[in-house]
Amino acid sequence: MHPQGSTHGRPPLGVAMIGYAFMGKAHSNAWRNVASYFDVPAFEQRVIVGRDPEGVAAAATKYGWAESATDWRAVMDRDDIHVVDLCTPGYMHAEIALAALAAGKHVLVEKPLANTLAEAEAMAAAAREAQSRGVQSMVGFNYRRVPALALARELISEGRLGAIRQVRAAYLQDWLVNPETPMTWRLQKDTAGSGALGDIASHAIDQVLFLLADRVTDVSGRLHTFTSHRPGARGLEEVTVDDAAWATLTLASGAIASIEVSRVATGQKNSLKIEIYGDKGAILFDLENLNELDFLDATAPAREQGFRRIPVNEPDHPYMAAWWPQGHIIGWEHTFTHEIRDFLVAIDTGAQPSPSFQDGLAVQRILAAVAESAAAGSSMVRLDNSPATAAPVATEGA
C-alpha cells in the first residue's frame, strides 16, 4: 500500500490497530484522514487485529487496513510494525501495551489507561523505561484535542480567568436508562474495571487536570448502580459496575472541582458540560456545541460584563488552520485526527507525547480514590503523591 504523510527520506511507520469496534472505527477514520490535513511522518495502515476472523477482515476492508489478523502476539513480532494503536476493552490494555513497549513499538492506548491502579502503575513504569530507548506512548483522552478546550487552556494559562476557584464538570448519557438494555462488557468489572466512573468520569477528571495544569490532593466520591441485573446470555446477569458517580476534588492550587457522571440521565445523549470560575473571569463549554466557548471577562466594567460567545473556527485557534475556511465548523471525529497527528509528530521529533502514561496514571489514581471513598461512605481520601499533569499539549502550529 502507498504510504501516507511525508517520507523525509525515511521509511514509513507501520501501524497496527488492536480492536475494531466503536473506538477502532473512530481511530481508523483518523488514520485515514490525518495525512490529508496535517504534515506528519509517513505511515501505512498495515494490520487490524480482532478475535473474529470474518468481522475483523470486513473491518480491514471497510476502514482502510491492508490486512487483518486474529493474534495480537504475532503482530508484536513483526519488524514492519512500529506503532500499536490499542482500542480494546480495558482489561486487555495492560498486557498488550506492556508487550508492545517491550517489543519496541510506539503505543497509543484508549482511555482510561487500565482497569486497575496496579496495571496503570506497571504501564507508566514501562513507558518511562521505553522512552529511554526512544519508544513513545500516549493515552487517548481525545477531548484535549477539541479546539475550544485547547483554547480554554490557553486563556487560563494566560491568566485571563485569574485564580481558579471552582470547576463543575458533568458528563451525562442515557444509554442505560432502560432496565432491559442487555448486558455488555462495559457492565462487568472484570472487563471494564468500572462503569460510568472509568468510562466518562475519566474524561471529566482529565479535563480538570488539563485545563488547570494542576493536580488533585484530596478526593471524596460516591458510586451508585440503579439497575442491578440485566438480560444476558445466561438470563438475568448481575451488573458489577456503577451507573453513575459523583466526586469532589481538591486541587493543589486550592480550587475545588465537582464531577458528576451518569449513563442513566434520561434525555442526555453525550453531554459534557464544563464550567470554570476564576476571580477575573469564567468559561463555559458544552460538548454538544463543541465549536463554541463562552467567556466572561470580570475585569471589564460591570455595565459591559456578560458571557460572550467565541466561535472557535479561526485559523489561529488550535488545530483549525488545517481544516476549512474560517466560519466552517468541525466535529467530534476530528478530535481523533488531532490526536493521531500529535502522536505521530511526537514520534517524529522525540517530544514528550501528552497525555503520557504518567498522566493516565494520575487520572487512574483519582478514579481509584473515588472508588475507595465511595466504599468508605464518601470519606475524604488524600492523594499525597499524585503527579502534576502540567505538560503542554502539542497543538497544530505550536
Image (spheres, grey):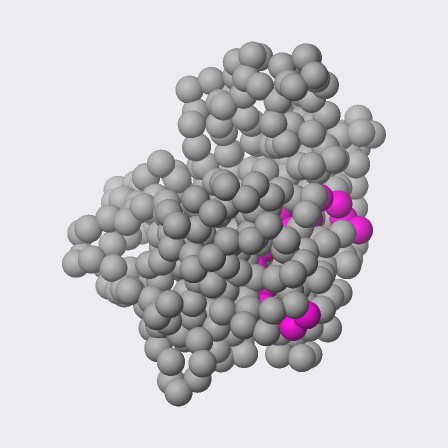
Q: Residue at x 32, y 39 (%)?
A: 289
Residue in the image at 41% along x and 75% along y: 41
Which image quadrant for residue 358? bottom right
Q: Which residues are magenta?
A: 103-118
- Quadrant where the C terminus lies? bottom left
Of the pair 116 and 150, the residue shown nearer to us = 116
**Residue 27 location (% of width, % of height):** 45, 52
Q: Quadrant of residue 64?
A: bottom left
Q: Quadrant of the N terminus?
A: bottom left
At 18% across and 52% down in the image, what residue appears?
327
- The stretch drawn in magenta includes residue 395: no
Q: Is residue 11 above or below residue 358?
A: below
Is residue 189 toward the left or the right of residue 259 in the image? right
In the rendered view, tell whether residue 193 sits above or below residue 60.
above
Q: Where is residue 345? Give x, y as percent.
A: 45, 72
Residue 105, x across and y down, in percent: 61, 69
> Where residue 384 appears, x then y in whole percent?
79, 54
In the rendered image, residue 108 lying in the magenta stretch gets the answer yes
Q: Is residue 62 left or right of residue 346?
A: left
Residue 376 falls in which quadrant of the image? top right
Can residue 32 be seen here? The reply is: yes
